[in-house]
Amino acid sequence: MLAVSSYPPEYVTQCRANVDELMKAYKKVSTAAANDAAVAKFAPLLFNHLVLALDEENARELRRLAPNDDARAKIRLLREFDKDAAPGAEVPDPYYGGPEGFDLVFDICLAACRGLLLHLQKAYLPHDS
């Protein structure tokens, strides 16, 4: 795996800024999600596409909130898209991994997102015949 420190500093800075923005958005969504009525309002939009969870606990909660079986089938663990991950592998909480925990989680997510991108390309882009 590549450590974050092996990337150019400006790349790491930009990634961290993107993560900060994502966390702000997540906090807004998770605050709304605390109210099941808000979830019901957004569920049709949310479950029209692939929904990714980082761990099984969150996947279970998403399945509970899903409006039907079709929506539940769209809920997947992010690491399902990492060809080197074991079945059912989760993204660990970086706070329990010491100083290297964040580097490890970054690398895990990067590998899974590469696989996710390949999956989306195969599923949604025209294929050469």
Image: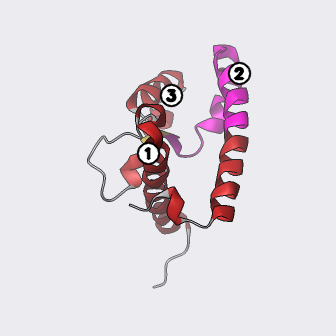
**How many numbered markers are drawn?**
3
In the image, is 33 to the left or to the right of 66? right
Which quadrant: the N terminus? bottom left
Reply above or below: 25 against 41: below
Q: Which label sits on residue 32?
A: 2
User: For the residues marked 3 and 2, what is the alpha-carbon distance in whole angstroms?
Assistant: 14 Å
Circle nearer the N terminus (1, 2): 2
Type of colouring: secondary structure
* Label 1 Cα crowd, 10 Å radius (few <14 / some 14-19 / many 20+): some
> What range is drawn magenta here?
23-52
Q: Which label sits on residue 100?
A: 1
In the image, is 36 to the left or to the right of 68? right
Query: What's under tag 1, amino acid-wise?
Result: Glu
User: For the residues marked 3 and 1, what is the alpha-carbon distance in whole angstroms?
Assistant: 29 Å
User: Residue 31, can we see it?
Assistant: yes
Query: What's under tag 3, amino acid-wise?
Result: Leu
User: For the residues marked 1 and 2, what is the alpha-carbon distance in whole angstroms?
Assistant: 32 Å
Image quadrant in which you'd find residue 101: top left
x, y percentage for residue 8? Answer: 61, 67
Residue 85 among magenta residues = no
Q: Do the residues labelled 1 and 2 touch (CB within 8 Å)?
A: no
User: Residue drawn at (63%, 37%), measured in percent from left and top?
Assistant: 46
x, y percentage for residue 114? Answer: 48, 62
* Label 3 Cα crowd, 10 Å radius (few <14 / some 14-19 / many 20+): many
Q: Which of 110 and 58 is in front in this view?
A: 110
Check disc 3 and report the residue beneath it: 62
Considering the numbered disc 3 on the image, is that residue within a helix, a strand or a loop?
helix
Camera-near label (1 vs 2) is 1
